[in-house]
Amino acid sequence: MAFDDLRDFIDALEQHDELKRIKFQVDPYLEITEFADRSVKTGGPALLFEKPKGSQFPVLINAFASAKRMEIALGVSDVEEIAQRIVGFLEMQKPEGLLDKLKMLPKLGEISAAFPKTVSSGPCKQVIRRSGFSLAEFPILHCWPGDAGRFITLPMVFSRDPETGKRNCGMYRLQVFDGQTTGMHWQKHKQGAEHYRRVVAEGKQLRMPVSVAIGSDPATTYSAILPLPPAVDEMMFAGFLRGKAVEMVKCETNDLEVPANSEIVLEGYVTPGELRREGPFGDHTGFYSLDDDYPVFHIECITHRKSPIYATTIVGPPPMEDFYMGKTIERIFLPLMRMQLPEVRDISMPAEGIFHNLILISIRKSYPGQARKVMHAIWGLGQAMFSKCIVVVDEDVDVQNVREVTWKALNNIDPQRDIEFSMGPIDSLDHASRMPNYGSKMGIDATTKWPSEGFTRRWPNVITMSPEVVRRVDELWKRAGLQ
């Protein structure tokens, strides 16, 4: 089921007892962060602050902060359903007869329904303000005590490739400098940063148009964080996720389009070559990312609903809302990884690894050195190139069970033989790398070692109880009155 907008999603969360309305005043300066952090770490609900201090607009946070809420957001009972839909499309072959053609029609219809549709107007145009506006009117959070200021943390940032005209939608934090300007945290490896570099290199544009949408339906907002190839339009993929085209509306002051159902839209530009110090910011690593120079976003126009809801998130010491968003990415994109690496059985990115610091991978091992082949392939896959530590285990190891992986991996390795190091791109937020954006990664081959890999000793079996005894004691256990 596709949600019409953010409000439709809020209603669904409320119906599932996944939302708590906070009806008294809470301060966007640190207090809302403390509320949200406590809630996510105790399995609490999404929070809608109806009276944030200093603003008339409500604040929604933790809307994606559980597996259940991610299922509601994407309209599924299990996010694996989306993975299976992807598999169905990947397995489509040329139809051989009339029956095959008829079977393909629903899939083709689903594809055609996914493409975004341009409309003349939408709810985000209910109020249009070309002057007299200020970001101070919105309840933008100052998240952590050491932050450099207030940050917009759940934006959909739209830009176009100056060479191809292709649209990109990414989620990049925006530090509020004043009522009309923010930082634009385009990390070096992100597609928005690539657009900016191309504009600078061309030297033809005095301004690079950028528009920012806040508070769309959940599938559309979620699509902004997905690690899609540059050629894939995030709004098209959002249509695939929601089973319904995203309606897009042209901005007032530039040619970019934004989701028509958005709560708030910031229209503006970035001037090539204009940089300003941005940060520190309490980041998803659990540490403050350090200050650095980033482009400046100038806002020329703000459009919004008559009474907009400000959607936001916080990041910090895991697990937090971003963990559940990332876990869903892990499940959705596993089929795509297996297309290129069919030996991969499962992957897991534990919360404590904050996505790029630790990836656990189980494989069906068929030849010597296969674990190392998988490590290097992962380091060559899009944003997986940032993976600081990859642990590869055999297919009988449950990588979703970190305790099992730790037990078997530490027993299976000879450190000097089974650990290798590689140099390459590192996430911009990694404060431990020897240089910004460049450093080392570690791969651990924790699979069973074979004679063909130079291991000549016998390999022991794992201790397990006889299944017959387990079944017999199951009954005796009940008779004994043991729980």
Image (cartoon, helix red, strand yellow):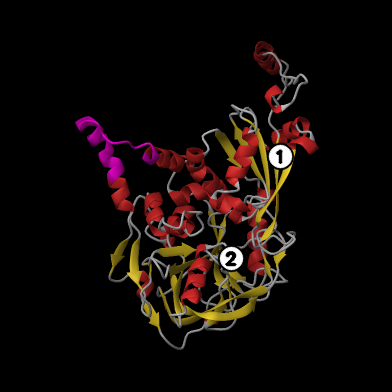
Q: Which residues are magenta?
A: 89-108
- Residue 177 tag number: none
Percent across and percent down for residue 281 are 67, 69
Q: Quadrant of residue 315?
A: bottom right
Percent across and percent down for residue 95 are 26, 34
| Residue appearing at x 67%, y 17% in the figure | 474
Q: SS for tag 2?
A: loop
How crowded is the residue under tag 2: few (<14 C-alpha within 10 Å), some, or many (20+)? some
Nearer-N-terminus badge (2/1)? 2
Q: Is residue 400 visible?
A: no
Percent across and percent down for residue 164 are 38, 65
Q: SS for tag 1?
A: strand
Q: Quadrant of residue 204?
A: bottom left
| Residue appearing at x 63%, y 42% in the figure | 375
Q: Quadrant of residue 377?
A: top right
Q: Amino acid at mark 1?
A: Ile
Based on the picture, tell me whether residue 180 belongs to the magenta stretch. Answer: no
- Residue bearing the label numbered 2: 188
Q: Nearer the viewer, residue 322 or 76?
A: 322
Percent across and percent down for residue 282 are 68, 66
**Magenta stretch: helix, strand or loop mostly:** helix
Query: How far apart are labels 2 and 1 at the CA level?
Result: 28 Å
| Residue appearing at x 59%, y 79% in the figure | 275
Q: Nearer the viewer, residue 137 or 377?
A: 377
Horizontally, is 420 left or right of 2 in the view? right
- Residue bearing the label numbered 1: 444
Q: Is residue 45 above or below residue 367?
A: below
Q: Is residue 219 above or below residue 283?
A: above
**Can you say which quadrant of the picture contains the C terminus?**
top right
Q: Is residue 375 above or below residue 471?
A: below
Q: Nearer the viewer, residue 377 or 251?
A: 377
